């Protein structure tokens, strides 16, 4: 699928403010990749509302088959940039999987994921859940209520299979975090365990996002963690029940990023700033006036060239609600956040959380000092580029000065707003790892399928 800048976008561009400062672009014809998820919205909005063209950029957007193909095509230069999993630039830069220096000058959103279980698992789990006065289950639902079912499967010699979208995806780490918070071991990665299933109580495997509902319906997996609209799709199809959102696992967690190679940014600094300017404007539009533009955004995303799911399915989460079981619709105004709470700023502490999870589960095989985490974060996350673009927008009257964290050092304040209440401080990653009951810490590593200390 390929989209060229059409008449509607040109008309929108002509209606945009004329005060934009036109940079001397090194490259003005660009191709960006994305996966069919609602959190690709800043790209679609920047395209459809003419924000790219305001910056002199002529952009094509291409849906990609999966996250690996998307990353590979950015590395080879077939794509100039892409909607990426937050862990992808970090993993590539440290050489986990594919090795390449990828950076992000723009964080695309907060929250937006959920964990869905099959109807059969939900029905077995439901009787033991705490209930509200109206009989509906109390949320958030903790993994400890899933643990007896997992243990029964193990005692019967039946694997408990669940899906996530990619080994370094937010979804993998969120699903693992939720399971581990309930005493369920999601397994380690190791030299002989690239699937991440060493010592696992639950077997996690990769399934591309749009295929999640069909894979669940076929019985291949018993649950999954994915972004929207594929949790709500399970509800609409009557094949599964979302039991928890990532907002409830880690409140206002960072989700996707916009990724480019370091080489692209070095060779095209003005083009990079122009891209970020357009994306910031799109994010502002998506959240402004208490999400007043979300209905229009849903209409855009429902088109086949973008997400291609039914309007009603996408609207279920994008417009401030979330449907858990069929008919159990609850207000979740921050399920998708694109600009509020400094969502677009690439915080070092966000990067470090992902690196701690890579270490926790064995993707980073050896212990690293705190300084290593900070150095990697600063080589990948580029708030300097972001703030340069933001300053230009403010000077042009296209953004408000107060909406950007000019004085931050790149680290958020410590927070315990996780499902297990454990505090995370990005300044002290090893102390954080020590505080987690399940997972590698200190100089532990996986050797021949076993966790050993030192050596």
Image: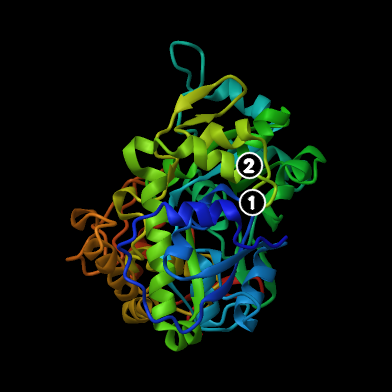
Q: Name the image quarter holding the N terminus.
A: bottom right
Real-space Cα separation, disc 1 to disc 2, in angstroms = 7 Å
- In depth, the one of 295 and 263 nearer the eye is 295
Give coordinates of residue 348: x percent, y percent: 33, 69
- Secondary structure of the residue carrying tag 2 is loop
Q: Quadrant of residue 242?
A: top right
Question: Compared to 120, does 248 lie above or below?
Answer: below
Q: Residues within 10 Å of mark 2 (few under 14, many from 20)?
A: many
Mark 2 sits on what residue?
A: 302
Residue 7: mark in rendering = none
- In depth, the one of 90 and 292 nearer the eye is 292
Could you tell me if the residues under marks 1 and 2 are in contact, i.e. CB atoms within 8 Å? yes
What residue appears at the point 54 percent right and 47 percent down from the top-left corner? Answer: 179
- Res 189 visible: yes
What residue appears at the point 77 percent right and 45 percent down from the top-left corner? Answer: 215
Question: Compared to 342, does 32 lie above or below?
Answer: below
- Secondary structure of the residue carrying tag 1 is loop
Give coordinates of residue 198: x percent, y percent: 65, 64
Mark 1 sits on what residue?
A: 306
Q: Is residue 320 left or right of residue 186?
A: left
Question: Compared to 170, does 141 lie above or below?
Answer: above
């Amino acid at each position: 699928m390929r989209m060229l800048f059409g008449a509607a976008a040109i008309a929108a561009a002509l209606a945009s403010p004329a005060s934009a400062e036109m940079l001397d672009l090194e490259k003005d014809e660009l191709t960006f990749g994305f996966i069919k998820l609602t959190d690709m919205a800043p790209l679609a909005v920047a395209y459809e509302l003419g924000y790219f063209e305001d910056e002199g950029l002529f952009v094509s957007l291409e849906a990609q088959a999966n996250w690996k193909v998307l990353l590979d095509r950015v590395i080879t230069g077939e794509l100039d940039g892409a909607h990426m999993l937050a862990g992808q630039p970090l993993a590539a830069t440290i050489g986990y999987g594919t090795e390449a220096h990828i950076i992000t000058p723009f964080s695309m959103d907060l929250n937006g994921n959920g964990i869905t279980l099959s109807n059969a698992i939900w029905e077995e789990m439901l009787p033991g859940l705490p209930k509200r006065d109206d009989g509906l289950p109390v949320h958030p639902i903790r993994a400890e209520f899933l643990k007896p079912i997992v243990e029964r499967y193990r005692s019967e010699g039946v694997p408990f299979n669940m899906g996530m979208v990619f080994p370094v995806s937010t979804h993998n780490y969120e699903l693992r975090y939720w399971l581990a918070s309930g005493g369920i071991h999601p397994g380690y990665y190791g030299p002989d365990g690239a699937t991440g299933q060493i010592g696992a109580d639950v077997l996690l495997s990769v399934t591309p996002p749009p295929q999640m509902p069909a894979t669940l319906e076929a019985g291949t997996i018993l649950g999954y963690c994915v972004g929207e609209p594929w949790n709500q799709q399970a509800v609409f199809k009557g094949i599964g029940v979302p039991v928890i959102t990532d907002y409830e696992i880690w409140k206002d967690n960072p989700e996707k990023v916009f990724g480019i190679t370091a080489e692209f940014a070095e060779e095209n600094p003005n083009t990079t700033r122009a891209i970020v300017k357009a994306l910031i404007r799109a994010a502002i539009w998506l959240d402004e006036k208490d999400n007043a533009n979300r209905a229009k955004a849903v209409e855009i995303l429902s088109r086949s060239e973008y997400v291609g799911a039914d309007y009603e399915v996408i609207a279920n989460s994008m417009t401030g609600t979330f449907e858990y079981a069929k008919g159990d619709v609850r207000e979740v105004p921050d399920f998708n956040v694109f600009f509020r709470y400094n969502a677009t700023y690439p915080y070092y502490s966000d990067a470090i959380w992902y690196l701690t999870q890579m270490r926790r589960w064995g993707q980073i095989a050896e212990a690293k000092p705190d300084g290593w985490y900070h150095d990697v974060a600063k080589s990948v996350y580029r708030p300097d580029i972001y703030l340069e673009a933001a300053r230009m927008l403010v000077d042009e009257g296209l953004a408000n000065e107060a909406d950007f964290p000019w004085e931050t050092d790149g680290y958020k304040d410590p927070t315990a707003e996780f499902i297990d209440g454990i505090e995370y401080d990005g300044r002290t990653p090893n102390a954080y790892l020590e505080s987690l009951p399940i997972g590698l810490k200190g100089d532990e590593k996986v050797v021949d399928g076993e966790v050993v200390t030192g050596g």
